Image (cartoon, rainbow, N blue to C red):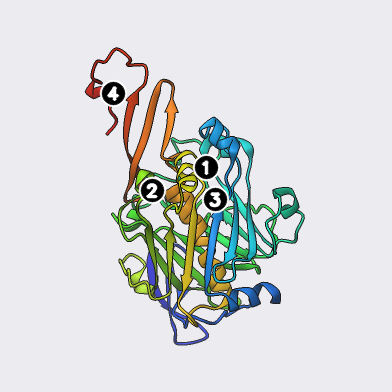
Amino acid sequence: MEMATVTSATSAVPVVVVNGIPIVAGNLGIDAVPLIDAQTAGILQAVDAFTVKQRVSLMEGITQGCIEVSNVYDVYDTKQGNVVFTAVETSEDCDRCCCAPNHKFRVLFKPATTKLQRDQVLSLPTVLTMDRPGETCSCNCDEKLGLGCCICPGCPACADGFVLYAGDVQEKQRNADASHKLITPQTIGYAEQPIPWGGGFTPTVNVMDRADATDKFRPLAKVEGASCCFGGCSELCCESAWPVSKMEPQQLNQKVLTGDLAQITKKKPDSMSAALREALTDSDTYTIEFAPGQLAPQQKATMISSLILVDYMFFEKDNGMCHMEGSKLKFTLFECYCAGCVCPCTFTIDTSNSGGQPAKSSDVSR
């Protein structure tokens, strides 16, 4: 991570330049540049606990992930049980089917009071746009390893992240060296994995907040996994905790894990039908609970977007807990994180071995 400390020309506040982006210290709880509409801001201000449910795709379940369908998330007020937003992924079919979950996409947040069909949701105005650069089906892997690989020094393209905008934004021309940091008047904030090593053995996302009307940002939070192992069959019996902690500029590459701002929780299934859904599809349920009075509306919006990024980065990779590969039934026991890589621990049963002979050690994935 390229870092330098300078002093702002307009004040004595230290400015840390990280990968070309000025980062300044500042107080949380106040939107320095209010950009979202009053209704959206009012909802985010009033609600401190949200439940995010990914809709089930029957097509993905039937084809065992061979046909990748764009995700739809319903965002509920946890206490009232009402839908307050619906977030819809828009992406190219080729990118999604060839490169998911590392593909580039936009997630459009729409105001919602009831659960609507996808086409109905898309007809609603867009209040927030989450833009995530990623792989395309025409990427040259010799030049760019892309998302999901080890985040080595000097390889910022391998760090996952997103930019959050107020309202609707069209596809932007990105700079390959600063793909997560496209600054426009509508930019609310952005997030990315730490460079280098992505937090080591702790899955980590650094979240930045708009500091002023120029192109300066301030640290908002650090989202960290409480464990380096998650997902797979472990989801049936264990919840996965992701503390959200206040972050200072000097903590960009440090572990924090205080959880003083919020807590993201990947929920375990609460019924047999929910367990079957999780076993055969990528549909998951999350909650995010904010510490009262700590975050402003746009800061909450950035954190909800970070929750969706966590889903794509860490829980969309296992294609459900079990799936068929030819005559082999593969179980994902859990995923393990290391320096940006998510490595599955799997167990495979060869269903064609009907003669009662024990499986060869070469047939069992480790």
Towards the viewer: 62 or 127: 62
* Image disc number at residue 256: none
Q: Residue at x 48, y 80 (%)?
A: 292
Quarter the C terminus occupies = top left
Q: Quadrant of residue 302?
A: bottom right
Q: Is residue 235 left or right of residue 64?
A: left
Disc 1 vs disc 4: which is toward the camera? 4
Q: Residues within 10 Å of mark 1 (few under 14, many from 20)?
A: many
| Label 4 residue SS | helix
Residue at the extreme front of the image, as rendered:
272
Which residue is the site of mark 2?
A: 236
Disc 3 vs disc 2: which is toward the camera? 2
Sequence-first disc among 3 and 2: 3
* Image disc number at residue 135: 1
Q: Tell me residue 254's x, y (percent).
A: 31, 67
Which residue type does callout 3 highlight? Pro
Classify 127 as above or below 360: below
Sequence-first disc among 1 and 4: 1
Residue 1 seen by the camera: no
Q: Quadrant of residue 343?
A: top left
Q: Tell me residue 151's x, y (percent).
A: 36, 50
